[in-house]
Image (spheres, helix red, strand yellow):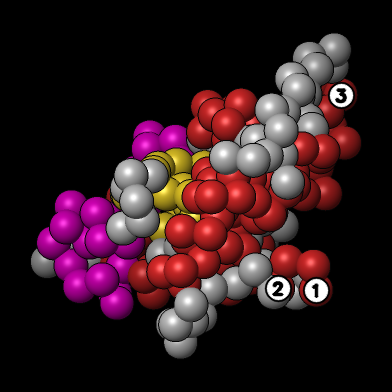
């Protein structure tokens, strides 16, 4: 059994080398320790970095932990990266991303029906950016692909989990509920409506 000091040092190294959020499960397996203990060590490191005012902080993302830059140093990062141009999401991309975030798992046909316009190109763009991913197939006719947001989405928008999504009235009504008995029929209706949606312009 490794000492807590050794394990905390190992966690820092693994986070640095991993490059993205490191799952508590994976870290526990490497350290041959209990997940609860490893999660506690991650939390200790997180507090230490914050209390010491470090330029690098540790953020929790869906039971994973990774390094991020301190938000107050954003100005210096921007100056360093100038004139690199940061690509921002278009209004259409933000709209589709919001629908997926609040409605997930969701099919393209459902998204098309909600927006009233085809969204295939926009969804593909979000997938390419790593913000959205295919997580399976629906039981509806044709078994269309279903989409959900990714850990990268949580990281980019500063959320620890999907529970942190703000309550926005226009999207809250899109949330699924386990008691939604009409879901099966709604899926079929969305399939029909989507075929009538106009083609989206690039």
Given residues 174 and 158, the one toward you in this image is 174
Mark 2 nearby-residue class (10 Å; few <14, some 14–19, many ≥20)? some
Name the magenta segment's main secondary structure.
helix
Q: Position of residue 174 (x, y in %)?
A: 65, 68
Q: Residue at x 80, y 67 (%)?
A: 170
- Which residue position holds label 2? 172
Q: Is residue 187 above or below residue 90?
A: below
- Which residue position holds label 1? 169
Given residues 45 and 92, the one toward you in this image is 92
Q: Is residue 58 above or below residue 95?
A: below
Which of the two labelled residues, at mark 2 and mark 3, occupies the earlier sequence position?
3
Which of the two labelled residues, at mark 1 and mark 3, occupies the earlier sequence position?
3
Magenta-drawn stretch contains 30: yes
Mark 1 nearby-residue class (10 Å; few <14, some 14–19, many ≥20)? few
Quadrant, the N terminus:
bottom left
Given residues 184 and 38, the one toward you in this image is 184
Q: Dot 3: what SS? A: helix
The stretch in magenta equals 14-38
């Amino acid at each position: 059994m490794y000492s807590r000091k050794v394990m905390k040092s190992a966690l820092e190294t693994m986070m640095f080398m991993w490059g993205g959020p490191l799952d508590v499960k994976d870290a526990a397996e490497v350290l041959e320790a209990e997940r609860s203990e490893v999660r506690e060590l991650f939390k200790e490191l997180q507090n230490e970095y914050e209390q010491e005012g470090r330029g690098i902080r540790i953020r929790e993302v869906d039971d994973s932990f990774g390094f991020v830059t301190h938000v107050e140093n954003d100005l210096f990062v921007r100056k360093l990266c100038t004139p690199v141009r940061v690509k921002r999401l278009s209004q259409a991309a933000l709209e589709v991303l919001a629908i997926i975030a609040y409605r997930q798992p969701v099919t393209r046909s459902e998204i098309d029906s909600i927006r009233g316009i085809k969204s295939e190109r926009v969804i593909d763009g979000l997938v390419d950016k790593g913000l959205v991913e295919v997580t399976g197939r629906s039981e509806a006719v044709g078994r269309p692909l279903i989409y959900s947001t990714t850990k990268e989405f949580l990281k980019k928008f500063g959320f620890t989990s999907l529970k942190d999504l703000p309550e926005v009235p226009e999207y809250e009504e899109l949330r699924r509920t386990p008691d939604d008995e009409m879901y099966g029929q709604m899926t079929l209706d969305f399939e029909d409506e989507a075929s009538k949606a106009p083609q989206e312009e690039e």
